[in-house]
Image: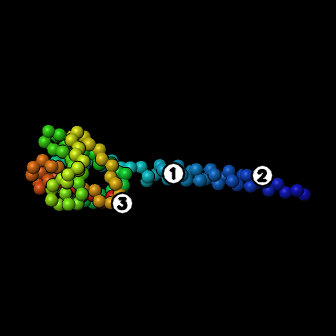
Amino acid sequence: MARHEGSSGAVLMSTVAVAMALLLLLGFEHGDAATTFVVGDSNGWNLGTEGWPNGKVFRAGDILRFNYNPTVHNVVAVDEGGYRSCIAPRGAKVFNSGKDEIMLSRGQNFFICTTPGHCQAGMKIAINSL
């Protein structure tokens, strides 16, 4: 009696390929999508926002949406020194549309408002992204 190992091997390979494709699809569908966070929730980006990140988990690739009045505020991406001093370093990226969306990078991310007195009044956030 002859054995037909070739056809059973092909069936096994097809089954493995389908199983891997399903795992990849499920993996992308659950957990890999970026989350969009509205900074300050319903209050938006405003004075006293400093504590807003507390208790939230951020991941690299997540989006921060800053909603604010652009005639009064801005958003400036700074380093830790700029965050602590409330002074934007030369060349810092300034956002001023009033509806800015900024993607988080892995590690520390710092943002301040450079309108005089606003950062000192808590219009700044520090976020550690996983």
Nearest the eye: 9 or 41: 9
Alpha carbons under labels 3 and 2: distance apart: 46 Å
Give the label, 3 or 2, closer to the camera: 3
Q: Could you tell which of marks 3 and 1 lies nearer the N-terminus?
A: 1
Q: Could you tell which of marks 2 and 1 lies nearer the N-terminus?
A: 2
Which label was assigned to residue 130?
3
Q: Residues at badges 3 and 1 in contact (C-beta under 8 Å)? A: no
Alpha carbons under labels 3 and 1: distance apart: 21 Å
Q: Dot 2, how many residues are within 10 Å of its Cα: few (below 14), some (14-19), or many (20+)?
A: few
Q: Dot 1, how many residues are within 10 Å of its Cα: few (below 14), some (14-19), or many (20+)?
A: few
In this rendering, the count of numbered labels is 3
Residue sitting at 23 percent across and 44 percent down? 95
Which label was assigned to residue 7?
2
Name, please, the residue furthest toward the left.
117
Residue sitting at 24 percent across and 57 percent down? 79
Residue sitting at 17 percent across and 40 percent down? 69
Label 1: state its secondary structure. helix
Q: Dot 3, how many residues are within 10 Å of its Cα: few (below 14), some (14-19), or many (20+)?
A: some
Observer able to see residue 117: yes
Label 2: state its secondary structure. helix
Residue on which the image places disc 1: 26
Q: Amino acid at mark 3?
A: Leu
Q: Residues at badges 2 and 1 in contact (C-beta under 8 Å)? A: no
Image-based side of 50 in relation to 14, left or right: left
